Image: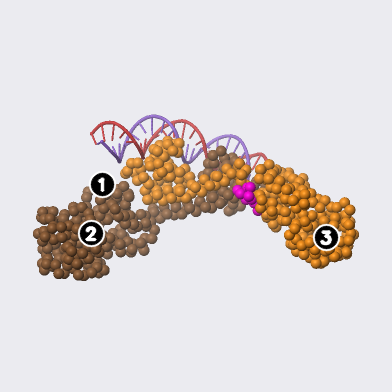
Chain colours: A brown, B orange, C red, D purple
Amino acid sequence: MGLHLEFRHLRTIKAIHEYGGLARAADQLNITQSALSHQIKGLEDQAGVELFVRRSRPMRLSAAGLRLLRLAEQVLPQVEAMEAEFSALKTGRAGRLHIAIECHACFEWLFPVLEAFRKSWPEVDVDIRPGLAFDALPALIKEEVDLVVSSDPEELPGVEFIELFDYAAVFVAASSHPLAEKAFIEPEDFRDQTLITYPVERSRLDIFSQLLIPAKVEPAAVRQVELTAMILLLVASNRGVSVLPDWVVREVKYSSDYVTRPLTREGVTRSLYAAVRSDDRDKPFMRELIALARTEAHRLQGL
Amino acid sequence: MGLHLEFRHLRTIKAIHEYGGLARAADQLNITQSALSHQIKGLEDQAGVELFVRRSRPMRLSAAGLRLLRLAEQVLPQVEAMEAEFSALKTGRAGRLHIAIECHACFEWLFPVLEAFRKSWPEVDVDIRPGLAFDALPALIKEEVDLVVSSDPEELPGVEFIELFDYAAVFVAASSHPLAEKAFIEPEDFRDQTLITYPVERSRLDIFSQLLIPAKVEPAAVRQVELTAMILLLVASNRGVSVLPDWVVREVKYSSDYVTRPLTREGVTRSLYAAVRSDDRDKPFMRELIALARTEAHRLQGL
DNA sequence: CGGCATTGTGAGACAAACTCATAATTCTCA
DNA sequence: TGAGAATTATGAGTTTGTCTCACAATGCCG
């Protein structure tokens, strides 16, 4: 009663139709004519339907057989398409590259990088996945994402942190702001300021982790703003000051009604890393993405 | 290297995704958890691609696995649709009913029959196949068609002739034609006439096979015309006379500028048969088509 | 860190599909 | 029409692969 159809049957049906006869089909499929005869008989028994007209030789598809042929011609190409994608996967031509960014401002340089990347690797499924700022590394391990941009490397089995580039965290204020007079900014300078930051926990903001927490300084106020463009707009109109990575404030697209100053005499320099699973590290498209990221960063930093 | 994909794999992938985990999927598929584990391992080895993320429990599909899931969700419904059609075939709800008509004029009553038939049997694939007037019976045996309308029954193994209805071959001429005066027409009457017939060999035309050949009479001229409406038009305008089945000349849609007369004092009566393969004879839709044909014929013959 | 839930592994049983050899058809052409 | 060629069917035996069973290994949760 229950039809036990297999791909082999579809291929057989198709070959018999295509090459006109069992014997020729058998050659094509590298199988004996006997095997095909048995195969079809079995299928007909299970289906309870005659698939071929046997009065004529070579045998031809019956009405029901033609229906099965239609199925074969729908289904087999779909399978082949998938196999082609798998082979692309194995040769490294294709793959998935979903990126989680811990650092809010990384959109700024990542977007143009991905634009360039897509042109060279059209078969790679690239995407930026927001909403993972917190659990990005566990998600990396569970293969929910394939690359995490982070500035805090950790020791994790199966995960590697690859340095992308260094950047400076720089102070930003309106041109008319009193602190714009200083050559460099010190922690104490923030005590009577409104600080504008991205809406994430303090430990993940350079200004707090590198300066204010060690110096035990609390700003007069902290305002959280999502969009980089918005932060710069507020700063330029003297609603507060901020600290941003250098690549952001060098972006030409933003207004220039603000000045930048180093943090401390020496400046605060940090590194950005790409965290990837060890398995993926040597895939060609992964290497290229990392190379592109470095190039783009240098371009933005005016080097 | 070569991926040996089977439907079983697609069903497994789908079930694991759907029921979240190998163990639950195994229950659903009435199979051991162990079997699924072996199955997937085999598939991954052959594909050379990891299909599942095993770091997490229950295991989840990887990027490649998701691609395979997409295939499963495309392909499995197509297979199910075909199986449904096969089951319809077996219960006799569905089937193919391609009809070859040897007699040219049979369009006239067959068309309305098929219109009615389609309403009751929407799953049956009905069609009239022209161009087989000659080899209709061999085509029936080879299952190229499923029913042949014929007026010449033969003894053939595996083929049965089912009587549909009787009809009279009647003489047709313009109302103003001299022969319209006669009560009935005899073979000799054709000797000085232009006879209009369908363009088929003489042995398959009632007027020749039943009258003129036995009486060894040759008409003054024979003109072959394809369309019934055209024949009646020519007859009405006195370009010749014709012999047609009674059901044709009773069709209201044709002009009535002609008269009909019986052939010979007794009339020439013939029978029309449906030739079908013995296998098909008792299928419900076949019986109904034959019943409908009889009904329609009686309607046309004014009974 | 221990117990629970889940997945992986190896050996053996079993069924399904294949090959080989040969029989039974149908087709072709003189 | 009938002999030979071409094609398909059948049966026995072998091989391949997939399943079950029992148990080991692994990740998950409190």
Secondary structure of residue under mark 3:
strand
Residue at 79% x, 61% y: name it. B256
Residue at 41% x, 51% y: name it. B67
Report x, y in % for residue C30. Answer: 75, 54
| Residues shaded magenta | B118-127
> Taking B209 as reference, is A91 left or right?
left
Amino acid type indicated by mark 1: Pro
How many marks can you see? 3
> Which of label 2 and label 1 is nearer to you?
2
Q: Which mark is residue A194?
A: none
Q: Which mark is residue A225?
A: 2
Chain letter of the residue carrying label 2: A
Is the residue at mark 3 from the same chain as the one at mark 1? no
Q: Quadrant of residue A110?
A: bottom left
Q: Please give the residue where the numbered disc 1 appears in the rendered image.
A: A157
Q: Please give the residue where the numbered disc 3 appears in the rendered image.
A: B259
| Cα distance in 3D space between marks 3 and 1 | 101 Å
In the rendered view, tell whether residue A167 sits above or below residue B70: below
Residue density around tag 2, few if under 14, some if 14–19, many if 20 or more, within 10 Å = some
Chain letter of the residue carrying label 3: B
> Taking B234 as reference, is B83 left or right?
left
Which mark sits nearer the N-terminus, 2 or 1?
Answer: 1
Is residue B83 visible in the rendered image? The answer is yes
| Cα distance in 3D space between marks 2 and 3 | 97 Å
Q: Is residue B126 magenta?
A: yes
Residue at 26% x, 47% y: name it. A157
